[in-house]
Image (spheres, rainbow, N blue to C red):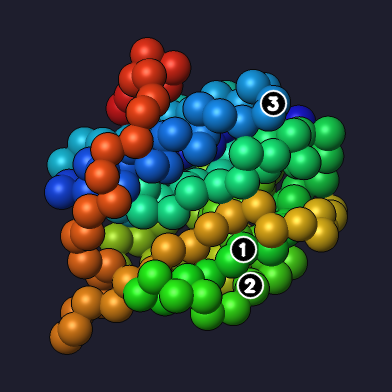
């Protein structure tokens, strides 16, 4: 496979983005393109724009407040199936919550690009679940890598749906190693 990883950056989360890019920059395998979408637009609009400009065989998304294992690319790059699933460790408000087995189409796992492009990503809360439900029936081949490769850092915002801004301090990365959109 060839892989593009789209990082969807939300305003006011610069330190979280630096942590995310630190992990992307320190992959044990450098065979993936990384596209950072940082325009001041809703998440779905950014993802739809990015999906339509991807030229690799597979695409996945990492939200700027999450991060991936340093061996993610190495663990998935040799697979050619429509979807490559793995485990995502979920933390809620900074504490361990559960391990999510990503065994069906998910935007946070490598998905064949034409399948990802065929379903519009919405701007509403839980748009990722709606996208997954539409893409899943399109997947004809899939595999599962039995490793924890994604770290989902969920923080609940009292009275709201979106994850609140929080600071993790600056993490070192070289912005020249990424494509910016």
Contact check, label 2 and label 3, Cβ < 8 Å: no
Task: Residue 54: tell me if it is visible.
Answer: no
- Residue 123, by quadrant, is bottom left
Residue identifier under label 3: 29
Contact check, label 3 and label 1, Cβ < 8 Å: no
Residue at the bottom extreme, as displayed: 159
Residue 93 versus residue 40 in the image, above or below: below
- The residue closer to the viewer here, 171 or 134, is 171
Looking at the rendered structure, the number of numbered marks drawn on it comes to 3
Residue 82, percent from left and from top: 76, 48
Residue 124 versus residue 1 in the image, above or below: below
Graded by Cα atoms within 10 Å as few (under 14), some (14 to 19) or many (20 or more), the crowding at tag 3 reads some
Graded by Cα atoms within 10 Å as few (under 14), some (14 to 19) or many (20 or more), the crowding at tag 1 reads many
Q: How far is disc 3 from disc 1 in space, using C-alphas? A: 20 Å
Task: Residue 67: tell me if it is visible.
Answer: yes
Relative horizontal placement of residue 57, taking residue 15 as reference (left or right): right
- The residue closer to the viewer here, 66 or 84, is 66
Residue identifier under label 1: 88
Element under disc 3: loop
Quadrant housing the N terminus: top right
Q: Residue at x 27, y 67 (%)?
A: 163
Q: Residue at x 68, y 29 (%)?
A: 28
């Amino acid at each position: 496979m060839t892989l593009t990883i789209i990082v969807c950056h939300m305003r006011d989360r610069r330190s979280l983005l630096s942590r995310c890019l630190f992990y992307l920059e320190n992959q044990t395998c450098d065979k993936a393109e990384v596209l950072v979408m940082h325009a001041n637009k809703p998440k779905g609009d950014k993802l739809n724009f990015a999906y339509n400009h991807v030229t690799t065989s597979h695409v996945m998304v990492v939200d700027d407040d999450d991060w991936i294992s340093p061996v993610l690319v190495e663990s998935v790059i040799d697979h050619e199936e429509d979807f490559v699933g793995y485990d995502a460790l979920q933390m809620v408000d900074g504490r361990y919550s559960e391990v999510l087995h990503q065994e069906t189409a998910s935007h946070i796992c490598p998905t064949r690009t034409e399948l990802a492009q065929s379903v519009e990503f919405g701007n509403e809360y839980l748009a990722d679940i709606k996208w997954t439900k539409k893409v899943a029936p399109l997947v004809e081949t899939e595999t599962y890598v039995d490793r924890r490769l994604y770290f989902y850092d969920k923080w609940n915002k009292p009275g709201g749906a979106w994850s609140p801004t929080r600071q993790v301090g600056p993490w070192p990365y070289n912005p020249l190693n990424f494509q910016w959109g």
